[in-house]
Every structure is written in structure tokens, then in C-alpha cells.
Amino acid sequence: MTSTTNQTTNQTTDTPLRPWSAARGAVGGTAAICPEATYGDEAAEYAALREGAGLWDAGAWGVFRFAGPSRLSFLHKYCTQDVKDLAPGAGAYGCCLTVKGGMVTDLRALAREDDALVLVTPAGRAPLPQHLTKFALFDKVTIAPADDLTLLGLHGPRAAAVAAAALGAPAPEGPPWTHAAVPWSGGPVQVAVAPLGGVAGLHLVVARDAAPALADALVAAGARPVGSAALEQVRVEEGVPLFGVDLDERTIPIEAGLEAQAISFSKGCYLGQEVIARIAHRGHVNRVLAAVRLAGDPAAAQVPLLRDGKEVGAVTTWARSPRAGAAVGLGLLHRKHADPGTPLEAGAGGPTATVVTLPVSPA
């Protein structure tokens, strides 16, 4: 069981791997993270992500190509992260913000010799170009969807070994979003270090028409196809919020605990910086990312989280957690009610939901 609220559901599910997935018994879901819900054995898919290597269709994500001599300095002005001096092969995770500090989208920037690739979740595909192109008039930069490319995800402790066996070359190592173009018989594959919380993983950017052959090679090397149900279980247990589901234009990145990975507090000005600086000076936000363990059937749970009848937060994703042995919800809570062990109600008259520590530990 996995359910989400507050999510953008009108994202594309027409990915290069859909026929490949359908031939392997995939059941379709929403495209909030990937368009397949399961390949028929959710428990085995979860085990692949936790113990082996789970392959998933990230073709609903956006891949943008930033070109021109000002590509990184331009992105630097409208991004929370320091990206202007990224060397080819280096990458960074950051956010684009409104002037009020709310998220336009989060993004992953991969610097290359002649351009930069920027990866966004399905919900970020439309707002990223809408937001940035209006500022690009006087910069030497072009921003365009890389429609010739698509994205595959590979996560689990054996992800790097499986990728190396499939591609015939080692996967890159280093901090998140370190990447390299790996030669392969079907064409070059841009392989990026992309952990999912504490779970090791890679993103593989490949030509659209080569994606099914790459998926075949990864499965032959030991990967198991996985869908969104298992991915959401792991994502919730790891406490990784997803833009378009748990995060939206009302979310300030610090509320979601993204400051360590997404925000540079030493870089120069960027859109929304004043809000971030005020929060940093004040020392706290009123809402924080938290998880709750549900005592009961999630079908009876509601989105609002209450304490003594007063709404103190909301769940944006429910997922059955094998580690907790129960449904776990991820969302934003008022910081005064976010301490582990705090008892809440999942809606008026709903089941008890107890705040738990992130990441969720095995029971």
C-alpha cells in the first residue's frame, strides 16, 4: 500500500520504457516518481532496493540541457546552491525559489564540457523552464528540454556493481551528483551518483531509443525492475521528500530539511535569498519534515494531523513500511509537535499516529 496526496498527477507516462515494462507485467500507477506501480511482487522489489539493485523507469522526470558560456553563472543566480564553478564531472543539488522563498522546483545540475544537464522530478518539468527562461534574456544561455534523452534509476547496495557489469566500465564514485560519460555499446551513458537517502544509487541518462536495451543489460547484470510502490516505501523510510508530492510552491527548503544538501550559505545573491537568510538568522522554521507511524488502517487516516483537536501538520505520503511493520506517513509538522514519540491523530476521530525518528529503523 502506498498513497500520496498533494501530488501533481498530470505528468507524462509516455516514457521509452513503458512497452518494456508492460511486457514484464508492470501495473501502471501515477507518474509522481515513476509510471509503474509494481511488477507484481512488491516485497521482492522492496528487497531489491534494500539488499540488491532495483531498476526503475525515471522517464517521467525532466532532463534539460543548459548551453552557452553563461550556463552555470546564470543558473547560479537563480539557484540556492553554488554551481558557477562546477568542473565537468561535478554536480550539485539545489532549488529554484520564488521571491518569497517558496520552491519553484528542486534540481540536480550535472556540469559537462560543452553544456550542463539539469534533472527535475516530473512535477518540476513545467515550472523550471517557465521560471528560468523569463530571466535568460540578457545571459548567454539557452535552456531546452533534452528530448533525445531519458532517465533510468538504479538503487540499492549493488547498484554500482550492476551498472559496472552492464556497461563494462566502473560507475563514478564521489559525492552525490558526481558523474561521468561511460562508453557503452548502445551509446554513451551519463552515470551520476544519486543516493536515495541512505540507499546507494545511480541515475543513468541515455538516448531514448537505447533505453530498453540498457534496461535489458542492467537486468541481465542482476537488477530487478521495481515500481513506485516499493520506491515510495524506501523513500518514506529514508525521509526523502519528493517535489510535487511532499514539497510545493509553499514549501521553504529549510522546512524540508534540505539546507545541508541544497543550500549554500556563503554564495552571493540569488532569488529568494533574503527569506533564507532571515530564517538562518532566526535559527528555526515553524514547520519541519517528520514521519508518523500509524496505529491502524491507513484507509481510515486523513491528511490533517491533529493534537488535542488542533491541526498541527499534514501527511503528504503514506506508505506501508516493512521496517516499521506499519504504515508510515511523511509530511510537515509544526516543530513543537515533531519530537519522536509525540502522539497525534490522523484526522478527527482517526487512528493514532506517533512521530518516529527519520530514517525509520528496522523494528
Image: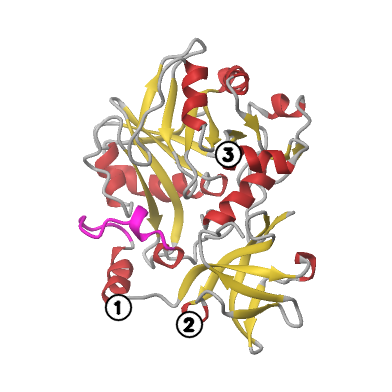
Identify which residue is drawn at 36% across, 26% down.
Answer: 180
- The part of the chain drawn in magenta is 257-271
Camera-nearest label, 1 or 3: 3
Location of residue 144 in the rendering, given as x and y in whole percent from the top left corner: 44, 34
Camera-nearest label, 2 or 3: 3
| Mark 3, residue position | 51
* SS at badge 1: helix
Location of residue 108 in the rendering, given as x and y in whole percent from the top left corner: 41, 43
Res 282 label: 1
Q: Report the amino acid beneath label 3.
A: Glu
Mark 1 in CB contact with mark 2 (< 8 angstroms): no
Identify which residue is drawn at 33% across, 51% down.
Answer: 79
* SS at badge 3: helix
Q: Report the amino acid beneath label 1.
A: Arg
Q: Quadrant of residue 68?
A: top left
Q: Report the amino acid beneath label 2.
A: Lys
Location of residue 226 in the rendering, given as x and y in whole percent from the top left corner: 66, 37
Question: Where the N terminus falls, by quadrant?
Answer: bottom right
| Mark 2, residue position | 336
Is there any visible trace of residue 332 in the rendered image? yes
